[in-house]
């Protein structure tokens, strides 16, 4: 834990700031001041002040973009857009370094030439995911985002032509995945597969679908086909 980490996390004690932070990380795209203010139910000047404080704390990042597709003279100034930062904050008193232990374990699995450790890791991840899902109600698809949110995935549900997809705005294992992507992403998918199986949701399928600013896993809904079989 560093002083900066503690200061950053402490800034979320302000209820307005925390509400704005939750609004931004729940959106699939970067959010403007006007949109954040409306979703948080506060005025734009107050939203702008707290959003910029969240940027100073390293919790959010800023980009600039002209909205509405306009460009050139008369298009106006680019809008200031806010999105979740990729920085991670670990705060414990006294300091603990559980990620160091995780790095050692992942390194040991990665160096196993036979692959038995890799299979055991994915099996254990699936079993743990099933146990974590026991808090939900079997067959209730709306409980899946709640289980994912409770374990740090920041899920966003999006409608698609075939049903829906849950995009994950945060990866709880981001730093590990940067060093051992194939291994950690496979473990991550197995964990979420366990959650889906624990909730008994056969129409939902975790898939590897890495995108910038998202977890490597997405959970897709596949609606049963209503077409008559051809003969």
Image: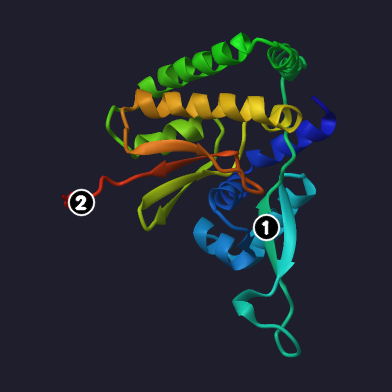
Pair 2/1: label in front: 2
Which residue is nearer to you in this view: 35 or 93?
35
The answer to which of 33 and 229 lies nearer the viewer is 229
Tell me which label, 2 or 1, sits earlier in the chain.
Answer: 1
Where is mark 1, residue-wise? Answer: 82
* Residue 211 visible at all: yes
Q: Quadrant of residue 138?
A: top left
In this picture, residue 122 sits left or right of residue 69: left
What is the residue that sits farthest to the front in this orientation? Answer: 231
Tell me the crowding category of disc 1: few under 14, some 14 to 19, or many 20 or more residues within 10 angstroms, Cα based: many
Percent from the top left, x then y, of residue 51?
68, 55
Quadrant assignment, res 10: top right
Q: For this view, does 116 lie left or right of residue 52?
A: left
Distance between mark 2 and mark 1 Cα atoms: 41 Å
Indicate whether 26 appears above or below 181.
below
Does residue 190 appear left or right of residue 30 in this picture? Answer: left
Residue 192, compared with residue 41, is above or below; it is above
In the structure shown, which secondary structural element does the residue marked by tag 2 occupy? loop
Q: Which residue sits at x=58%, y=60%?
A: 36
Residue for point 51% across, 59% down: 39
Q: Quadrant of the N terminus?
A: top right
Count of numbered badges drawn on the protein: 2
Q: Residue furthest bottom?
A: 74
Give the answer, above or below, for where 231 lies relative to 124.
below
Element marked by disc 1: strand
Q: Nearer the viewer, residue 209 or 171?
A: 209
Q: Position of residue 24 (x, y in %)?
A: 59, 52
* Residue behind mark 2: 226
Q: Residue at x 29, y 35 (%)?
A: 140
**Percent x, y of residue 28:** 55, 54
Q: Is residue 96 shown to the viewer in this render?
A: no
Q: Residues within 10 Å of mark 2 (few under 14, many from 20)?
A: few
């Amino acid at each position: 834990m560093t002083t900066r980490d503690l200061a950053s996390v402490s800034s979320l004690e302000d209820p307005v700031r925390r509400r704005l932070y939750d609004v931004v990380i729940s959106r699939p795209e970067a959010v403007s001041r006007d949109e954040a203010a409306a979703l948080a139910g506060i005025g734009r000047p107050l939203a702008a002040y707290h959003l910029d404080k969240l940027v100073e704390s390293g919790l959010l990042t800023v980009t600039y973009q002209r909205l509405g597709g306009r460009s050139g003279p008369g298009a106006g100034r680019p809008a200031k857009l806010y999105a979740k930062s990729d920085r991670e904050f670990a705060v414990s008193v006294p300091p603990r370094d559980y990620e160091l232990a995780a790095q050692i374990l992942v390194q040991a699995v990665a160096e196993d030439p036979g692959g038995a450790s890799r299979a055991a890791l994915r099996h254990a991840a699936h079993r743990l995911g099933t146990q974590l899902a026991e808090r939900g109600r079997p067959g209730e698809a709306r409980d899946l985002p709640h289980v994912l949110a409770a374990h740090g995935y920041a899920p966003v549900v999006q409608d698609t032509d075939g049903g829906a997809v849950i995009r994950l705005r945060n990866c709880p294992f981001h730093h590990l995945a940067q060093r051992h992507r194939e291994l950690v992403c496979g473990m991550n998918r197995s964990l979420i597969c366990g959650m889906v199986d624990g909730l008994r949701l056969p129409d939902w399928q975790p898939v590897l679908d890495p995108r910038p600013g998202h977890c490597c896993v997405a959970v897709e809904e596949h609606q049963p086909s209503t077409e008559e079989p051809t003969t």
